[in-house]
Amino acid sequence: MIKISVTSKLDGIRSWSLQALDTCPGSISSPGVLVDACKGCYATTGNYNYPNVKAPRLSNREDWERVDWVSDMVSALQNDRFFRWFDSGDMYTLGLAEKILEVMRLTPWCSHWLPTRMHKFPKFALVLQEMRALPNVSARFSSDSINGKYTKGLHGSVIVADPDQTTKAMTLCRAYENAGKCSGCRACWDRSVKVIAYPAHGRKMNKVIQILKAA
Ligand code: SF4
C-alpha cells in the first residue's frame, strides 16, 4: 500500500520516503565514513526515530516492488500539484529509479522535486537524464559539502554553514526566516533555479560543523 508522508516544512506538500542512510549509498565516502552533508542528517534524529515515522518508510521499501506500484502512485497523485520524493532516503536501486521515472511521466499535472546523490553512480546516468528531460521534474544533485562548495553544472543544492556563505550564483533557502516553513516558496521545484543553498540546521549538523572547523 502506498504510504505518503507530509512534513511540516513543505506547506502540506506530500512526499514518498524511505529510511535514511539504509537507502543512501551516495552518503558513503569510504567504508564506514559518511560524507559531511550526511553526518548531521536531520532524518536520523528527533521525530524520525519514532516508530510511526519509521514504519511507512520501512513499508515503502518493500512496497515499490509491487507490479501495481506505478499505477497506484499515479492514482495517489491525482490531486497533487507539487510532490517531493525522499524527504528521507534515496532511490537506492535502478529498478526503483525507473519506476519513479514512469510515475513522473504519467503525472504531467504534478511538479516533482527529487533531491539525490545517486548521480555518483554511472549506471543511474540515463534514468536521471530522462527525468531531467521532463518539464515537470526538478532532479537536484546534492553536493556533499556543508560549506557551500559545489560543482557548477553538476550540483543543484548545497548546505551552507551560514547564510553569509551564499554566493550570487545560489538561491538561499529562507525557510529559517519563516519558522522553518517554505511559506509559498517553490524554488526547489523551479527548474530555472540552478543551485539552492540550505543553511545548516539542527544540533547534530551544528556539531559536525564545529568538529570540521576545529580539524
Ligand atoms: S528553497 Fe524554498 S521551496 Fe526549497 S525548501 Fe527552501 S523554502 Fe522550501
Image (cartoon, grey):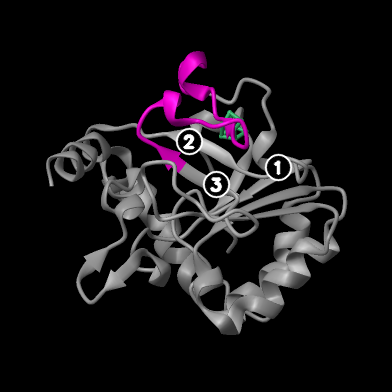
Depth order, front residue of 108/163: 163
Quadrant assignment for ligand 1: top right
> Which residue does the numbered mark 3 point to in the structure image?
157
Q: Residue at x 71, y 40 (%)?
A: 193
Residue 212 is one of the magenta-drawn residues = no
> Which residue does the numbered mark 2 point to in the structure image?
198
Q: Residue at x 53, y 60 (%)?
A: 116
Q: Please state which of the two labelled residues, at mark 3 or mark 1, is closer to the viewer.
A: 3
Secondary element under disc 3, as helix, strand or loop, is: strand
Secondary element under disc 2, as helix, strand or loop, is: strand
- The three-letter amino acid code for the residue at tag 1 is Trp
> How far from the left and from the top, in percent, is residue 66?
61, 78
Q: Which residues are magenta?
A: 159-180
User: How crowded is the residue under tag 3: few (<14 C-alpha within 10 Å), some, or many (20+)?
Assistant: many
Q: Is residue 193 left or right of residue 170?
A: right
- The three-letter amino acid code for the residue at tag 3 is Ser
> Looking at the rendering, in which quadrant would you find the N terminus?
bottom right
Judge: label 1 CB < 8 Å from ligand 1.
Answer: yes
Mark 3 touching mark 1, by CB under 8 A?
A: no
User: How crowded is the residue under tag 1: few (<14 C-alpha within 10 Å), some, or many (20+)?
Assistant: many
**Label 1 or label 2, whichever comes before in sequence order:** 1
User: How crowded is the residue under tag 2: few (<14 C-alpha within 10 Å), some, or many (20+)?
Assistant: many
Secondary element under disc 1, as helix, strand or loop, is: helix
Give residue 208's quadrant in the image.
Answer: top left
Judge: label 2 CB < 8 Å from ligand 1.
Answer: yes
Q: Residue at x 38, y 27 (%)?
A: 162
> Which residue does the numbered mark 1 point to in the structure image?
189
> How far from the left and from the top, in percent, is residue 175?
52, 23
